[in-house]
């Protein structure tokens, strides 16, 4: 009667976007090497990567990263099923999950289109209000 048909995501692995963000330092919460990390991943991108890896996942938008409250949202991922079997045998650990997801995010369909200047795409408007784009 605990979950009533809904999987108990409390037991799932938590993946904050910060963990695989190449823009962050280890102190700020990055957990994999810069070379393997990706730039500013979003929860949606991470979620899409999990579904690509055939992993059950849940996006928790109302949660923030404790070390940096501006980082809102996290993804819960089911690595092991109730019986202890792996959801995806290629991904036995959190670390592997982070490395796989970080590798996939840059190839995310939403990313590959972003190469054109921001003025033409309306993707910039969907970002939560965090100041204007930096001029590079």
Image: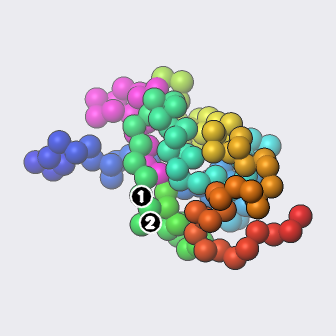
Tell me which segment is drawn in magenta.
Answer: 75-88
Q: Which residue reaches farthest left?
A: 1
In the orientation shown, which residue stands out farthest toward the front?
120
**Does the image show residue 117?**
yes
> For mark 2, does the 10 Å Cα neighbourhood hold few (<14), some (14 to 19), or many (20 or more) residues?
some
Relative to 74, residue 107 above or below: above
Q: Are marks 2 and 1 in contact (CB under 8 Å)?
A: yes
Tell me the CA gap for discs 2 and 1: 6 Å
Is 4 rendered above or below residue 104? below
Name the residue tied to disc 1: 60
Q: Is residue 85 magenta?
A: yes
The residue depicted at 33 percent of the width and 52 percent of the height is 10
Q: Main secondary structure of the magenta part?
A: loop
Q: Which mark is residue 40?
A: none
Residue 30 is left or right of residue 45, and the answer is right
Q: Residue at x 52, y 40 (%)?
A: 48
Is residue 22 on the magenta stretch?
A: no
Q: Secondary structure at mark 1?
A: strand
Give neighbour class at mark 1: few <14, some 14-19, many 20+ (Cα, 10 Å): some
Percent position of residue 84, x then y:
34, 30
Based on the displayed image, in which of its 4 quarters is residue 136 positioned? bottom right
Please name whichever residue, 134 or 103, is drawn nearer the observer in this view of the structure. Answer: 134
Comparing 93 with 3, the one in front is 3
Query: Badge 2 is on which residue?
Result: 63
Q: How far from the left and from the top, in percent, is residue 121?
A: 70, 55
Q: Give x and y (percent) for residue 58.
A: 40, 48
Q: Is residue 67 visible?
A: no
Secondary structure at numbered mark 2: strand
Front residue of 8/51: it is 51
Residue at horizontal 81 percent and vertical 69 percent from the top: 134
Q: Is residue 41 above or below residue 94?
A: below
């Amino acid at each position: 009667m605990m979950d009533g048909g809904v999987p108990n995501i409390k037991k799932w692995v938590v993946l904050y976007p910060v963990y695989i963000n190449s823009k962050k330092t280890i102190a700020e919460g990055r957990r994999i090497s810069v070379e393997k990390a990706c730039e500013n991943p979003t929860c949606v991108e991470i979620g899409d990567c999990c579904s690509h890896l055939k992993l059950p996942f849940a996006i928790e938008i109302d949660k923030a990263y404790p070390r940096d409250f501006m980082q809102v949202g996290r993804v819960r991922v089911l690595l092991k099923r109730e019986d202890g079997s792996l959801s995806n045998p290629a991904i036995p650990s959190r670390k592997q999950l982070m490395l796989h997801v970080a590798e996939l995010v840059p190839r995310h369909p939403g990313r590959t289109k972003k190469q054109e200047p921001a003025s033409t795409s309306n993707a910039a408007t969907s970002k939560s209000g965090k100041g204007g784009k930096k001029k590079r």
